[in-house]
Amino acid sequence: MTYLPKLLSLATAVPPFVLKQTEVAAQARDLFAHRARDIDRLMPVFTNAGIETRRSCVPLEWYREAADWKDRNAIYVESAVEVLADASLKCLDQVDMAVEEVDAIITVSTTGIATPSLDARLMNKLGLRRDIIRLPVFGLGCAGGVLGLSRAASFAAAMPGKNVLLLVVELCALTFRPGDLSKSNVIAAALFGDGAAAALVSTRASAAAPHSQPLLAAAGEYTWPDSLDVMGWHIEDDGFGVLFSRDIPAIIADRFGPALDGFLASNALSRADLSEYVCHPGGTKVLEALESTLALPQGAMRDARDVLRDYGNMSAATVLFVLERALRRSTGERLLMSSLGPGFTVAFQVLEQP
């Protein structure tokens, strides 16, 4: 017998500090003006990013400090646990589920390191069962939201009737390093925000679910060869140094479509079978490239643009913010989630309305 996993509930959470893009741009100019000769050429990235506000686990003034990796990671661990606990309780509350009813927990994050892992720390904070199955996942980057949901679906299918809680948290803004004068660091300063999401997956439906409980159907991924230098981190003495290739929009334009069509064909589907796309909004140029390659009108990805405007790029968590909005209003029968991450990898997840 085949057991089909369902998305029972989905919740998001953000840390307390609001960063206005105009204020971030002013501080970036002040920080770099006397050290980066081409700062004037780079400043338009702040106005062209399509972002108005972002959330951060530290106030704006903190980013002027030359914090070392130890201090940054300590903030990451404390703040990640707090925002994950918030998202978890919201998610479980939507279906009137007690924390003791969670059987497995998958925790996805790539913006800090925690050993014991974040899920172990959450066991104590939330009172999760001591025999819960745990899987911490590191290194997926922006693809982690989609791939994490796919892994949660696989867990749920393998354990019929059990409840799997997916947790995704990225504190991207913490990775900003004031001593890094690279173009990638300036772009990251214009894009990155902090956020978390929690999704509850099970083969068993819930009468208390706040929306229709879509089936988590076909999932897949494709990693292009010789593409390790497209996106990721390089490790520096004071933390994670961001790696962005300027070729990402071009890669999407050239390669996303064939990868998508190959995935759909392997699951007896085509683009005509999809009612809506739920894509990770890496930035405005990424969204424009996706709309173009998918033959959508410019600006069609409204939810993705709204999330980018309000929260910035929260790496893996972002696409789950987009999905949350899509599920609130969507009447479509079949949604396709997608995101791109280090590898260089594209991840796909189909959701089907029952």
Image (cartoon, rainbow, N blue to C red):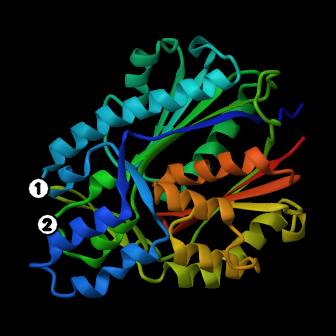
Q: Quadrant of residue 188?
A: bottom left
Task: Answer few, some or many: residues within 10 Å of disc 1's Cα (few below 14, many 20 plus, some between 14 and 19).
Answer: some
Q: Tell me which amino acid carries mark 2.
A: Gly
Q: Tell me which amino acid carries mark 1.
A: Ala
Q: Is residue 150 visible?
A: yes
Residue 19 or residue 177, whichever sits in front: 19
Q: Which mark is residue 30?
A: none
- Mark 2 — residue? 179
Residue 227 or residue 37, whichever sits in front: 37
Residue found 90% across the figure and 31% down from its top: 1
- The relative height of residue 197 versus residue 306 in the rendered view (above or below) is above
Q: Which mark is residue 66?
A: 1
Residue found 62% across the figure and 23% down from its top: 92
Label 1 – label 2 distance at C-alpha: 7 Å
Quarter of the rendering occupied by the C terminus: top right
Q: Quadrant of residue 240?
A: bottom left
Q: Position of residue 67 (x, y in %)?
A: 13, 50
Q: Are marks 1 and 2 in contact (CB under 8 Å)?
A: yes
Q: Would you say 260 lies left or right of 31 here?
A: right
